[in-house]
């Protein structure tokens, strides 16, 4: 299978450089409008697609991001691997602003978002014990280290609804739960990528200490933007190294991300809603 790397750019990352034959493409999905047009091109012989999660100019709030449309659009374009970049707060003393973290676990505290492509008329349950793709994450880690990033190879990300930052009580509670990072966009994005049978890796950029740290003030936007500005160039360098590391061909995923729907659909074939099936053509067409 030909590989296509999809990049979802979070706060501070609104473009990638150096794509050959680059053009912005409008993608229609049955789930509504994606966050923006998708920048497609090739880098080192590998097809790539870039979607700014909040739209160019950061026009969408965390709750306003249409994650279903975003994942569908990238899958519809032919993406096989997704690397999501996002700004996060740190809940650990040793994860300091400027660090990068490969997320490997999530805790979901969102409540106002559509979290699945499936539902009444076609019910499915995918495995999510290991929510990111370990082989893909490892390659992202190699790229990050080669680019000179200070990298942590694992971290638990708690996804909050936002758009407000945490209260002090919440920040302290999340630390007690064992969360390492806090952000507003990691979920349901990762869940939807699994339903769409895409390998998904999350590269988190630490911008602040949330509000728990006694020696640092509560997080504010100016602080976040300043750190993001310093990290954005490094994030682009990491992304630029991925095509050479991953190559133009996509072998079967050792973790089984590309077969997540093999035994997931519960609804009997003769009872499946044809309207919902039509909407699932891109994300679940392999099994439907």
Image (tube, grey):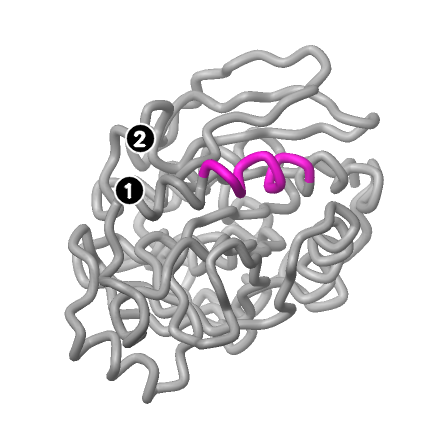
Per the rendered image, the range of residues in magenta is: 229-237
Q: Is residue 44 magenta?
A: no
Label drawn at residue 142: none
Residue found 24% across the figure and 51% down from its top: 220
Quote the CA–CA distance across marks 2 and 1: 15 Å
Give how far across and how far down residue 197 sits, in percent.
Answer: 57, 54
User: Toward which corner of the image does residue 173 lie, by quadrant?
Assistant: bottom left
Give how far across and how far down residue 135 sits, in percent.
Answer: 73, 62
Say whether marks 2 and 1 touch (CB < 8 Å).
Answer: no
Residue found 26% across the figure and 45% down from its top: 221
Q: Secondary structure at mark 2?
A: loop
**In the image, farthest residue toward the bottom:** 176
Residue 53, placed above or below residue 175: above
User: Toward which corner of the image does residue 182 lie, by quadrant?
Assistant: bottom left
User: Toward which corner of the image does residue 124 lie, by quadrant?
Assistant: bottom left
Residue found 55% across the figure and 70% down from its top: 104
Give how far across and how far down residue 47 sits, in percent.
Answer: 72, 28
Is residue 164 toward the left or the right of residue 77 in the image?
A: left
Q: Secondary structure at mark 1?
A: helix
The residue that disc 1 covers is 222
Whether residue 8 is visible, yes or no, is yes
The residue that disc 2 covers is 58
Give how far across and how far down residue 176 sits, in percent.
Answer: 32, 88
Residue 171, placed above or below residue 149: below
Foreground label between 2 and 1: 1
Residue in front for this viewpoint, 235 or 49? 235
Q: Where is the N terminus found, in terms of image quarters?
A: top right
Is residue 30 toward the left or the right of residue 125 in the image?
A: left
Q: Earlier in the sequence, mark 2 or mark 1?
A: 2
**In the image, farthest residue toward the front:** 215
């Amino acid at each position: 299978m030909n590989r296509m790397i999809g990049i979802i750019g979070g706060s501070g990352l609104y473009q990638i450089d150096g794509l050959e034959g680059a053009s912005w493409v409008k993608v229609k999905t049955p789930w509504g409008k994606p966050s923006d047009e998708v920048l497609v091109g090739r880098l080192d012989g590998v097809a790539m697609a870039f979607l700014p999660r909040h739209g160019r100019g950061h026009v969408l709030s965390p709750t306003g991001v249409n994650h279903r449309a975003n994942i569908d659009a990238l899958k519809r374009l032919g993406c096989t691997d997704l690397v999501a970049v996002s700004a996060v707060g740190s809940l650990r003393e040793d994860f300091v602003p400027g660090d990068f973290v490969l997320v490997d676990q999530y805790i979901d505290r969102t409540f106002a978002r559509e979290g699945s492509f499936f539902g009444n008329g076609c019910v499915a349950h995918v495995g999510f014990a290991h929510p990111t793709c370990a082989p893909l994450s490892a390659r992202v880690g190699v790229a990050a280290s080669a680019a000179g990033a200070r990298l942590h190879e694992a971290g638990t990300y708690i996804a909050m609804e936002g758009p407000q930052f945490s209260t002090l009580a919440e920040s302290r509670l999340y630390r007690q739960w064992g969360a390492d990072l806090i952000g507003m966009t990691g979920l349901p994005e990762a869940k939807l990528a699994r339903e769409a049978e895409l390998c998904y890796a999350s590269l988190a950029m630490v911008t602040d200490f949330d509000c728990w740290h006694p020696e640092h003030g509560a997080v504010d936007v100016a602080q976040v933007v300043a750190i993001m500005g310093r990290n954005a160039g490094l994030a682009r360098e990491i992304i630029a190294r991925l095509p050479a590391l991953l190559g133009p061909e996509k072998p079967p995923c050792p973790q089984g991300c590309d077969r997540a729907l093999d035994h997931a659909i519960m609804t009997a074939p003769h009872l499946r809603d044809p309207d919902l099936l039509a909407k699932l053509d891109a994300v679940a067409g392999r099994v439907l």
